Amino acid sequence: MTCAGAWTLTAVLAFVAAPSFSDAGQRGRQGAAPAAQPSDPVAEAYSQFLLAHRLEDDNDIDGAIAAYKRAMTLDPQAADVASELADLYMRQDRMADAIAAAEQALKIAPANREAHRVLGTIYASMASSGQPDQTPRASQQAQRENLAKAIQHLEQAIDHPLGQPDANLRAMLARLYVGTANYDKAIPLLVELVKEEPQWQDGAALLVEAYAAAGREQEAIRWLEEAVEDDPQLYPALADFYGREHKWQQAASAYEQALQASPRSVDLKVRYASMLLNAGGQENAIKARDALREVLTARVGDERALYLLSQAERRAGSLDAAESAARRLIAQNAKSPSGFAALAEALEERRNYQGVVDALVPAISTLRSGQDPSFSLSLLLPHLGFAYQQMGQFDMAISTFEEARKLSPADPVLTGYLIQAEMAAKHFAAAAELAHQARADQPDSLPLARLEAQALRQSGKADQGIALLEGQLQKHTDDPEAYVALAEVYSESNRGAQAVKVLQDAQTKFPSEGALTFELAAVFEKQKKYADAETVFRQLIAREPNHAAALNYLGYMLAERGERLDESVGYIKRALAIEPDNGSYLDSLGWAYFKSGKLDLAEENLKRAADQLLTNSVVQDHYGDVLARLGRYDQAIAAWNRALAGDGDSIDQGDVDKKIRSARQKLPKK
């Protein structure tokens, strides 16, 4: 009498030198056993089982298979024999026979580990290889079924081990879990495996892949931060996860560590430079520039590196080099929009908006005729629209932004550009309506609400704009920009006291937020509380010495009042050292020189500002003043007319008209 899945007591007594066999599928290659009693079929089955092993060792596969089959006939309840035969079939690539033998073993002993291992391995292989003779839909269905079977059998094989679970089986199962997006099972299994089998090189990569696909970035970072101590090869993965979390400086540091192990890796240097640029700051830009120059020495035509180099050169203050890198990229691949985007950014930094138009109009025309130009156009059209807007060509700006918005109608940034262009064109009602419509889909968007409030104020509905931003503040109590936005509209609506209170309350909550301090100083200045404004600006500059906007504002405030003009010039020059081509700062410097009576220096800087800021009424008014003082009345009149046609901010139109009439009287009689 036999029992399922094990050799009988008779067989064991007949072969006292032989080991016992269990459902788990031990191979039993312990050597020859004493001769069995011929009258005992189970004992003879065991003899055939051992013979099969010897024949297989002698590479007599057909003989081994025949011996297994005889053993199965003699003891049909011995599951191990069937599972061992299945394993042999699998190793001989006779998959159908292997499946049949393994399934027979499981009918005898459903927990037979070896049979589950064989079936799990076969079905996993079938899932990965597919069936070339099937239709795509049938092949996908078969793949899903094979994956499910493979996972089911491998789980059974691992759940019923004789000793320590097989690392190879667990690794195979982990891959299947990842392949079927079953990350909750894959991740803990992989964590154990990587710890137990540190030499398994694919394990860490597979675990990182699972963490990433599951969206469990924080867990991945914690694991990688520990793992890199023992395996520096994981630094690139750690850097990638830092980047996913927008931890740019930490990502750059991790790539820097990775480069210590692989100093010649061009790809690592490119990624390192990209993270440095994302982190911001001139020091990081210089490091990125140096790394990218090395990359382009080793790989001259690397388009990604050329684009990033243009960015790095621009942020490092080398505008000629930035433009040169962009033009190199364009010369190399005129069909790629990235070179034109980099060129536009370099020219924008110079405030050379006509140059942007000259470069982008033909490029966009060419790209429109290409296949699926949407991405290229969505990248370049905003640059073109901004250039038109800065040049005072508002209709062109609006139509360009409208085209860009059609390509990405749900992009709030593009909607914001269009609203700003409408406001620049003094279409305030249209701008307010556009912002209101956009907020229907994004009611909590602070930037859109801020634009709508500005448009409402400009169209004579300041109270509605204030109410809108007061409501937004309730939704964005943890965002300093919400306080700045509300204070700004309060100030522009002659509610200076409320603006001050909002900002001072916010400063208590966000004591180190520079935007709040800057806006508070600006509000004081608009209220003509100059001493308070100067005190706050000085506090901000003491805390942030390179705050260019604060340096310029303080310098201009002193110049406008004709006070301490040498000190005024000093502040503005510091601002220009940070942003050399900023038209507003050039206007401030020119105005300070004008107040000092240094007309040549005033005219030089004001001309640069006026050429750049064509629609800025104050800048054009200042330029007209210095031209008139120099006796160039016809040019002064042209500048003042531009002031009247411009944005109208901070000028007295009646006063400008008076200056024009006075200048005309001084023109030579024709």
Image (spheres, rainbow, N blue to C red):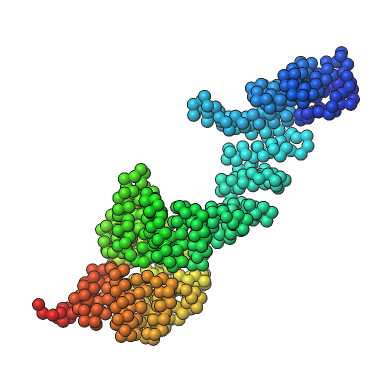
Please name whichever residue, 351 or 156, is drawn nearer the observer in this view of the structure.
Answer: 351
Question: Residue 563: percent from the left, percent from the top?
Answer: 37, 86
Say whether residue 248 is left or right of residue 38.
Answer: left
Image point 60% across, 43% down: which residue? 183
Among all residues in the image, which is located at the extreme top?
Answer: 39
Q: Does 440 appear above or below 351? A: above
Q: Is residue 576 above or below residue 154?
A: below
Q: How far from the left and from the top, in percent, is residue 429?
A: 28, 60
In the image, 582 versus 367, the foreground residue is 367
Picture quarter with the N terminus = top right
Task: Pick the residue in front: 432 or 618.
Answer: 618
Total marks placed: 0
- Would you identify the image quadrant in which residue 184 lies? top right
Q: Is residue 642 visible?
A: yes
Quarter placement of the C terminus: bottom left
**Is 217 or 369 nearer to us in this picture?**
369
In the depicted structure, whether residue 379 falls above or below residue 37: below
Query: Is 59 placed above or below 644 here?
Result: above
Q: Residue furthest left?
A: 670
Q: Looking at the picture, how far across and down is residue 242, in whole percent? A: 56, 56
Q: Position of residue 165 (x, y in %)?
A: 74, 38
Name the residue at 30% across, 62% down.
Answer: 354
Res. 60 image quadrant: top right
Left or right: residue 306 versus residue 87 is left
Which residue is drawn at the image coordinates 71% and 25% (left, top)?
Answer: 88
Note whether residue 274 is visible: no
Q: Residue at x 18, y 79 (%)?
A: 663
- The image quadrant that residue 163 belongs to is top right
